[in-house]
Image: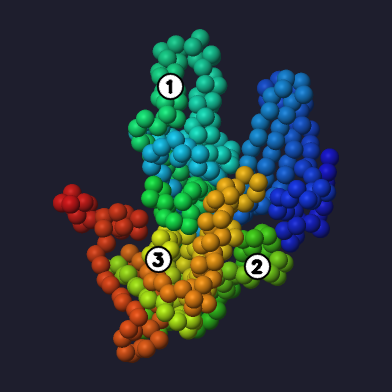
């Protein structure tokens, strides 16, 4: 059995990138009980990294006595700041091939069948939509022989439901798959990347107290909705520092937080994390004010390399659109950022091209890889001033900002449009109340 040395734990060396060239990096093996025949089998553990999904533990069990085998995947990375919900309209058999990372904390629903797989009832998996359906069928079929003997009527109803699940794989009718994960560590592939996925909706949400308890990040007896707040004036005048863990290597790190007033705009909270162990740096921006009454759409005609130095605030609710590239980045991606236009474009390139988990490795599609490579080259041309485009920041919460370099005069290359949010946008922002419910009924 291989041993994980104590000195490798700190600094993140335990989790390595998957590589066929690293022959020394072998799974850890241990003897463990087979839950099928109750004799001893072998469990193999591999600690590795998948882009976006961070660190994972892949475990594989096999029993030489009865032949039973099982493979599981478990997230070893940090829990994200917000939960994530993926809603996919499955319209064709091609959609069944979409790859899915499903964390064990995720709830899977198919509303058309009133079917739900609760959180923590299945181990995490890296699979496809078809694989999720097959796994659900296998789970329901597992104890059918016992049910037929004990309660034939219930067994018959489950058989009927299994047939409905199997029929979904024919995609004779469109159906909806919802994956809601409070840990924020689940993902559904966008096969059209870098273009917008018309069939997939991604939204972020704030976890409930009960979900925090399920994830183990809040004590069972802690029922307070919000942690005690700091004095507002202290936040304005000081940089607050608190301990955290690095999102890359999980080593102890520190996060700095500061309340900053952006000229001609509003106050925002900037949080920056620096890791001394691996050198990773990240920054995130949260709006310091409430959601605005109207949404904001900012359109900039990028015509000169000097535009790259414009300060830019992208809130966590803001979508980024580049019409000339047929590109749209949803509000759930990248989070909140206070950077420059060049910084945002580089982050987009890194997210779509460099860190795309579904175009890495031997199974990646050659055409898709080439398409993403060309997209990255176009981003480079925009940064260097060789390609003029329109960049649109569409924020239904009205909390995003792009610097007007001509201020206080109007910017000839920039337009700012205020608009009334739709019911769906209010729902994504968690703002729906009696007034918006009436709006839905009337529209």
Label 1: state its secondary structure.
helix
Image side of residue 265 versus residue 374, left or right: left
Q: Which of marks 3 and 2 is in front?
A: 3
Label 2: state its secondary structure.
loop
Q: Earlier in the sequence, mark 1 or mark 2?
A: 1
Say which residue label 2 marks.
280
Say which residue label 3 marks.
324
Q: Which of marks 3 and 1 is nearer the N terminus?
A: 1
Say which residue label 1 marks.
163
Report the Cα–Cα distance between label 3 and label 2.
33 Å
At 72% from the left and 22% from the top, the residue drawn is 67
Judged from this view, the residue extending furthest toward the left is 442
At 48% from the left and 63% from the top, the residue drawn is 335
Label 3: state its secondary structure.
helix
Report the Cα–Cα distance between label 3 and label 1.
46 Å
Q: Position of residue 404 (x, y in %)?
A: 38, 83
Report the Cα–Cα distance between label 1 and label 2.
49 Å
């Amino acid at each position: 059995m291989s041993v994980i040395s104590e000195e490798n734990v700190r600094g993140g060396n335990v989790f390595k990138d998957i590589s066929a060239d690293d022959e020394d990096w072998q799974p850890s093996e241990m003897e463990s009980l087979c839950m099928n025949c109750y004799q001893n089998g072998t469990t193999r553990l591999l600690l590795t990294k998948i882009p976006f999904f961070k660190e994972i533990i892949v475990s594989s069990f096999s029993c030489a006595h009865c032949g039973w085998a099982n493979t599981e995947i478990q997230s070893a990375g940090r829990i994200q700041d917000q939960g994530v919900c993926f809603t996919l309209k499955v319209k064709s058999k091609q959609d069944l091939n979409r790859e899915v990372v499903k964390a064990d904390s995720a709830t899977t629903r198919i509303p058309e069948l009133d079917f739900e797989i609760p959180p923590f009832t299945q181990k995490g998996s890296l699979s496809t939509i078809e694989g999720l359906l097959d796994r659900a069928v296998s789970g329901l079929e597992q104890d059918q022989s016992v049910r037929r003997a004990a309660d034939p009527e219930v067994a018959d109803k489950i058989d009927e439901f299994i047939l409905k699940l199997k029929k979904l794989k024919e995609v004779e009718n469109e159906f909806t798959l919802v994956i809601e994960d409070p840990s924020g560590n689940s993902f559904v592939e966008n096969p059209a990347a870098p273009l917008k996925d018309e069939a997939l909706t991604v939204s972020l949400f704030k976890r409930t107290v009960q979900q925090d308890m399920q994830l183990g990040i809040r004590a069972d007896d802690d029922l307070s909705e919000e942690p005690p707040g700091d004095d507002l004036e202290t936040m304005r005048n000081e940089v607050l520092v608190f301990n955290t863990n690095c999102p890359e290597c999980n080593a102890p790190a520190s996060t700095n937080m500061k309340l900053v007033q952006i000229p001609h705009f509003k106050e925002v909270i900037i949080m920056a994390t620096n890791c001394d162990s691996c050198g990773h740096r990240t920054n995130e921006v949260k709006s310091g004010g409430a959601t605005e009454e109207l949404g904001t759409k900012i359109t900039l005609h990028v015509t000169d390399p000097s535009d790259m130095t414009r300060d830019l605030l992208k809130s966590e609710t803001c979508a980024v659109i580049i019409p000339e590239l047929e590109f749209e980045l949803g509000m759930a991606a990248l989070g909140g950022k206070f950077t420059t236009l060049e910084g945002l474009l580089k982050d987009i390139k890194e997210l779509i091209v460099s860190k795309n988990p579904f175009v890495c490795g031997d199974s990646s599609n050659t055409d898709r890889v080439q398409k993403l490579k060309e997209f990255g080259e176009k981003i480079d041309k925009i940064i260097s001033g060789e390609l003029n485009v329109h960049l649109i920041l569409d924020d239904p919460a009205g909390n995003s900002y792009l610097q007007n370099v001509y201020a206080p005069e109007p910017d000839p290359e920039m337009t700012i449009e205020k608009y009334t949010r739709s019911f769906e946008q209010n729902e994504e922002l968690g703002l729906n109340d009696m007034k918006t419910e009436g709006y839905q009924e009337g529209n």
